[in-house]
Image (cartoon, grey):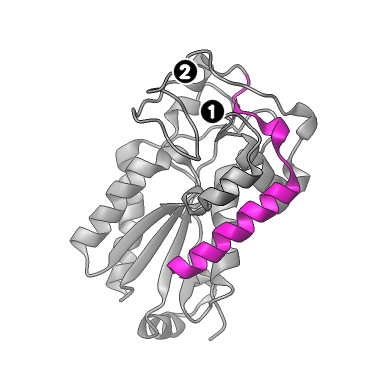
C-alpha cells in the first residue's frame, strides 16, 4: 500500500498497516493567537505539514493520523481567537486516541507537537498510553529536531527570547509552508521587560525554571520574539532539517 493518511484507509487496510508494524504519527497543535502577523492555525499547520512531509516519504513505515487542533492554552485567552481546552480534558483526549490505536494493534505511536505549552500534557498522555496499553508512545516537539549547528548558522534574533512565539523561527517556517497566510507588514518585535537567567522563553533552549502567565502581562502584541528577522529561506532550511530527522526517528 502507498496510502499513508489514516482516515483514507479502509478497516482491512488498517489491519494490514498494523501487520506491517507501521508507526502511527499524530500531529498535535492548538488554535490560538500568534501575534498580528500569523494565523491562529500556526501550531497545527507546522506539526501537520512537517509530519506529512516525513510520512509521505516512508508510506510503508508509518501512517499519518488527522491532527489534534485543540489543546491547553488558557494563557492566550486574553487575545481574541484562542480556543482553550482544560488540561485534564486534553490529556484524556490524546490518551484515548492512543488507546484506540493500541487496541487495533499499533505498537509504536509518535506524537509530533507544534505548541510549546503542549509539552507537559503530551508527556503525560504519552506515558499513559505506554503504561496502560501494549504500545509504546513517544512525543517530540518539532523544533527539538533542529540541529544545533543550524540554529547557530541561521539565527539572527537575540538569545534568549528571539525565538519564542510568533517569532523568527515560527514566522520563517510559516513563510516557507504557507506564505500566503503571513502578514509581514504587521510583524512586531516584542520582548518582555522582565528577563533573567532563570526566567525566559525560547524554543531553541528553555529557561531552567518553568513558568507561564497570561500573555498580555508581558506582550502587547501577542508576539514573543523577533519575527522581523524571519525569511522563507530560513524556513525552508529549518523544515528540511526537521523532516529529515523525523524520518530517521520514525
Q: As displayed, is residue 38 above or below residue 220?
A: below
Question: Would you say 53 lies left or right of 230 here?
Answer: left
N-term mark: 1 or 2: 1
Do the residues under discs 1 and 2 have CB atoms within 8 angstroms? yes
Q: How far apart are marks 1 and 2 (CA)?
A: 9 Å
The residue sitting at 28% across, 71% down in the picture is 103
- Would residue 90 be visible to someone looking at this image? no
Q: In which quarter of the image is residue 134?
A: bottom left
**Which range of residues does the magenta coloring cover?**
221-250
Q: In which quarter of the image is residue 80?
A: top right
- Residue 209 in the magenta stretch? The answer is no
- Residue 233 in the magenta stretch? The answer is yes
Crowd class of label 2 (few under 14; some 14 to 19; many from 20; radius 10 Å): few
Measured as percent of width and height from the top left, residue 150 is found at 59, 50
Measured as percent of width and height from the top left, residue 167 is found at 62, 34
Q: Name the residue under label 1.
A: 161
Measured as percent of width and height from the top left, residue 97 is found at 36, 59
Crowd class of label 1 (few under 14; some 14 to 19; many from 20; radius 10 Å): many
Measured as percent of width and height from the top left, residue 46 is found at 58, 51
Q: What element carries label 1?
A: loop
Q: Who is closer to the viewer here, 52 or 224?
A: 224
The residue sitting at 50% across, 40% down in the picture is 204
Quadrant that contains the C terminus: bottom left
Q: Which mark is residue 195?
A: 2
Q: As displayed, is residue 165 above or below residue 136?
A: above
Q: Which mark is residue 87?
A: none
The residue sitting at 63% across, 21% down in the picture is 221
Q: Who is closer to the viewer here, 37 or 71?
A: 37
The residue sitting at 50% across, 27% down in the picture is 76
Q: What element carries label 2?
A: loop
Q: Who is closer to the viewer here, 26 or 196?
A: 196
Q: As displayed, is residue 64 above or below residue 238?
A: below
Amino acid at each position: 500500500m502507498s496510502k499513508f493518511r489514516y482516515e483514507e484507509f479502509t478497516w482491512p487496510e488498517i489491519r494490514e498497516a498494523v501487520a506491517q508494524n507501521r508507526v502511527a504519527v499524530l500531529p498535535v497543535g492548538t488554535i490560538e493567537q500568534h501575534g498580528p502577523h500569523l494565523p491562529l492555525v500556526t501550531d497545527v499547520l507546522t506539526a501537520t505539514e512537517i509530519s506529512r512531509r516525513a510520512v509521505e516519504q516512508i508510506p510503508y513505515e508509518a501512517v499519518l493520523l488527522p491532527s489534534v487542533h485543540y489543546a491547553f492554552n488558557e494563557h492566550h485567552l486574553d487575545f481574541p481567537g484562542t480556543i482553550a481546552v482544560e488540561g485534564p480534558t486534553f490529556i484524556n483526549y490524546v490518551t484515548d486516541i492512543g488507546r484506540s490505536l493500541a487496541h487495533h494493534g499499533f505498537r509504536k505511536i509518535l506524537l509530533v507537537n507544534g505548541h510549546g505549552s503542549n509539552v507537559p500534557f503530551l508527556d503525560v498522555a504519552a506515558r499513559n498510553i505506554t503504561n496502560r496499553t501494549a504500545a509504546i508512545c513517544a512525543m517530540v516537539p518539532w523544533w527539538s529536531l533542529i540541529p544545533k549547528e543550524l540554529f547557530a548558522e541561521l539565527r539572527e534574533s537575540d538569545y534568549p527570547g528571539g525565538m519564542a512565539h510568533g517569532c523568527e523561527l515560527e514566522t520563517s517556517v510559516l513563510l516557507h509552508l504557507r506564505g500566503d497566510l503571513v502578514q509581514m507588514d504587521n510583524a512586531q518585535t516584542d520582548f518582555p521587560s522582565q528577563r533573567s537567567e532563570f526566567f525566559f522563553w525560547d524554543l531553541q533552549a528553555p529557561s531552567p525554571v518553568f513558568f507561564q502567565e497570561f500573555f498580555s502581562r508581558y506582550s502587547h502584541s501577542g508576539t514573543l520574539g523577533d519575527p522581523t528577522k524571519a525569511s522563507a529561506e530560513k524556513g525552508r532550511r529549518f523544515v528540511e532539517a526537521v523532516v529529515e530527522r523525523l524520518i530517521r526517528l520514525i
